[in-house]
Image (spheres, helix red, strand yellow):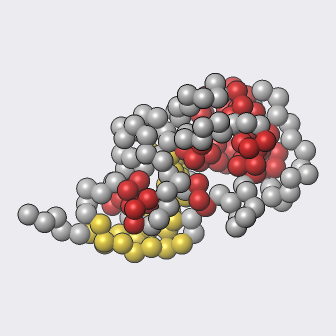
Amino acid sequence: MTEELQEITLTVNGRRHVLAVQPRRLLVDVLRDDLGLPGTHIGCEHGVCGTCTVLLDDASVRACITLAVQADGRSVRTVEGLADGMRLHPLQEEFWDKQGLQCGYCTPGMLMRAVEILEQVPDPTPDQVREGIASNLCRCTGYQYIVEAVLAAAPRMRSENPWDPTVPTEAKA
């Protein structure tokens, strides 16, 4: 018995895609396999670890437990959409500079969660960052470097030109 395909439209990182998918297909599989965006990692496959975190209409979701059909007609942002060509996003630069990406497996999900945090709370306290990223697991960094990176990126993301690395940072975790 073959499962009928359902047509969906996704806007991923600003690009519109029309796809025919099985209704049971997961968003993470569509992003990785159909759209060639491997940055969304697959970790626990139960929605616990956060490595698969993407932004769906600007809210973080676990792509490993979200059906692709649930994203029909909606906007998805993945880690591949952060950089501007060869220029890293301020969060990516700060994760690099502050050693917040050790093995790197949790990094895509952590970056997407951090984007959401900074868009909701542009000037967070260290405790707000810790609480915000608590939904994403990291076995390497102990979270301190990640918190420092998010706090350092905050003033850059608030500035008129967040891509300018000369905007002073205020990272005090």
| Quarter-of-image position of residue 98 | top right
Residue 164 screen position, x and y as percent: 86, 57
Looking at the image, which residue is at 48% across and 47% down?
41
Question: Left or right: where does residue 60 sit relative to residue 83?
Answer: left
| Quarter-of-image position of residue 6 | bottom left
Q: Can residue 90 be seen in this view?
A: yes
Q: Is residue 113 visible?
A: no
Looking at the image, which residue is at 55% across and 28% down?
139
Looking at the image, which residue is at 34% across and 54% down?
26
In the displayed image of the protein, which residue is found farthest to the front? 103
Q: 158 and 97: which one is in front? A: 97
Q: 127 and 92: which one is in front? A: 92
Question: Left or right: where does residue 2 sit relative to residue 157?
Answer: left
Question: Left or right: where does residue 147 sit relative to residue 169?
Answer: left
Q: Which quadrant is home to the C terminus? A: top right
Residue 148 screen position, x and y as percent: 75, 33
Q: How many marks?
A: 0
Residue 81 screen position, x and y as percent: 61, 61
- Vertical comparison of 98 with 83: above or below: above
- Vertical comparison of 25 with 115: above or below: below
Q: Which quadrant is home to the N terminus? A: bottom left
Looking at the image, which residue is at 82% across and 34% down?
171
Residue 17 screen position, x and y as percent: 45, 73
Q: 107 and 124: which one is in front? A: 107
In the displayed image of the protein, which residue is found farthest to the left? 1
| Quarter-of-image position of residue 71 | bottom left
